[in-house]
Amino acid sequence: MPEGDTVWLTAHRLNTALAGRPVTVFDLRVPALATTDLTGRTVTEVVARGKHVLTRFDDDLTLHSHLRMDGSWYLSRPGRPPHRHPEHLIRALVGNAEWLATGYRVHDLRIVTRAGEADVVGHLGPDLLGPDWDVELAVHNLQREPDAAIAEALLDQRHLAGIGNLYKCEVLFVERVNPWTPVGEVADLRAVATTAQRLLRANRDHPEQSTTGYLGRGREHWVYERGGEGCLRCRTRIQRQDQGVPPKARSTYWCPSCQPASS
């Protein structure tokens, strides 16, 4: 699933291409919205809210989309749609005289009013990359479930919005917190939330994701997808284990020396 920084960059690029320009192409290829036509409206802005993308128009309507595991938006010049995926995977087209935004396998397409945005994103906690970021509120939200494993709590978008599996693993390594530690036993939740915001912000302006400061192959991440390899900090073998309740269980990576389990 795309992380919050990837969704932020997607929305930023869409905003640059679409905002302030009247819509000349609008095609939603899902049955419930197939007859919806917003051509002639002007896109006012495209923003990310956690892992959701909100395309706002000048008539108080918003197109909501979610990338989930496999969705993506691509930009191309009119008449030259990208060919990264077969056309039958296109779910949305929004274009103007300069740019065409193509949504491949984007999910949860809905047209709502600006006030109705609360119906699709109102449940989210403070956005790690948004103007509403509030570390104290994020900590408060996490503390509501003191018995939950911290790794699973960080993935719950109701607590704080934007963390995916990559940052879950990396943040906990940086803060030396074992992923199975109950939230109520984490010594400094504020530091965990602050580190999450710092790492996402450091990566939001480019597609590459590095939590170590290096972009060399095998050195971009401290533990994520490095199961069986040596820890970059202490050389202990990185562990990998599924965590959570199926079908929502996710792979967790951690260093047993840098992130020891509570005794």
Image (cartoon, helix red, strand yellow):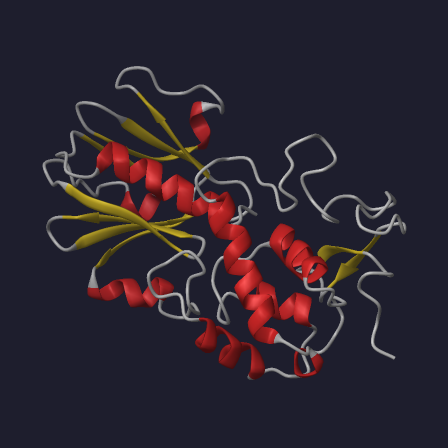
Dividing the picture into quadrants, the one containing residue 214 is top right
Dividing the picture into quadrants, the one containing residue 11 is top left
Dividing the picture into quadrants, the one containing residue 30 is top left
Could you tell me residue 246's position as x and y percent?
71, 62
Choose between 242 and 138: the one closer to the eye.
Answer: 138
Choose between 108 and 74: the one closer to the eye.
Answer: 74
* Residue 241 visible in the snapshot: yes
* Residue 67 visible in the snapshot: no
Looking at the image, how many numbered discs can be counted on the residues? Answer: 0
Could you tell me residue 70's position as x and y percent?
54, 40
- Residue drawn at x 48%, y 40% is 71
Residue 210 versus residue 191 in the image, above or below: above
- Residue drawn at x 28%, y 62% is 117
Residue 8 versus residue 192 in the image, above or below: above
Residue 135 versus residue 91 in the image, above or below: below
> Residue reaching furthest top?
80
In the image, is 191 to the left or to the right of 244?
left
Choose between 220 and 42: the one closer to the eye.
Answer: 220
In the image, is 241 to the left or to the right of 103?
right
- Residue drawn at x 67%, y 39% is 220
- Residue drawn at x 50%, y 81% is 140
Could you tell me residue 118's position as x and y percent?
30, 67
In the image, is 40 to the left or to the right of 83?
left
Could you tell me residue 104's position as x and y percent?
43, 34
Quadrant of image for the C terminus? bottom right
In the image, is 217 to the left or to the right of 49?
right
